[in-house]
Image (cartoon, grey):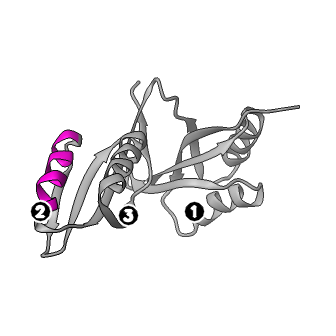
Amino acid sequence: MYRPMKQEIVSVLVKNQANVLTRVISMFGRRGFNIDSLTVSPTNDPEISRITIAFTATERSMQQIITQTEKLEVVESVSLLDSENSLYRELLLLKVHSTQAQRAGIREICEIYRAKIVALTLDSMIIELTGTPEKLDAFITVMEGDYNVTEVCRTGVSGIERI
């Protein structure tokens, strides 16, 4: 029976202790899940951290991994972030080889995407962009179409529910 795969993003609130990240992530690895994106950050409570995990799964396997993650004693809560009721953001740093003649075109693309040029050398530029993963993907595609992208660094998705 065919089960469609879908990217899911979960927010896991955990106790801020040593080895918590290893315990949560190893749960995914032992079950055969590939993690597409992972971020860890403090919350407004110094005793709690947020782990945001993006992974691809079927509906059934996604429910299983959430249930198993909730059973870990270091986990306070697990929330599936619904794209309609949540905000996602990611940070991109992109290094582009650029000549003097190419810089105006790169600046125009940056203006359209609201990206910032954060470093400039004689032969390259580093661009910073924050937005949804889809926006970052589109920006990279446009830049790779006309320019020599030499490095890409992405933070991974962070997300929070609106309500």
Disc 2 element:
helix
Q: Quadrant of the N terminus?
A: top right
Q: Residue at x 19, y 54 (%)?
A: 106
* Cα–Cα gap, marks 2 and 3: 22 Å
Estimate the x, y position of residue 57 in percent, counting from the top left: 69, 42
Q: Quadrant of residue 85 in the image?
A: top left
Estimate the x, y position of residue 141 in percent, counting from the top left: 39, 49
Q: Residue at x 52, y 54 (%)?
A: 37
Estimate the x, y position of residue 21 in percent, counting from the top left: 56, 62
| Left or right of residue 40, residue 10 in this image | right
The segment highlighted magenta reads 101-112
Residue occupied by mark 2: 101
Which numbered circle lies on residue 20?
1
**Please, what is the three-letter code of the amino acid marked with disc 1?**
Val
Q: In the depicted view, which residue is nearer to us: 150 or 127? A: 150
The answer to whether any part of residue 29 appears in the image is: yes
Disc 1 element:
helix
Residue occupied by mark 3: 152
Q: Earlier in the sequence, mark 1 or mark 3?
A: 1
Q: Residue at x 77, y 54 (%)?
A: 31
**Please, what is the three-letter code of the amino acid marked with disc 2?**
Ala
State if disc 1 and disc 2 touch (CB < 8 Å).
Answer: no
Q: Is residue 128 above or below residue 126?
A: above
Q: Residue at x 29, y 47 (%)?
A: 130
* Cα–Cα gap, marks 1 and 3: 28 Å
| Left or right of residue 113, residue 103 in this image | left
Q: In the depicted view, which residue is nearer to us: 155 or 162? A: 155
Q: Nearer the viewer, mark 2 or mark 3?
A: 2
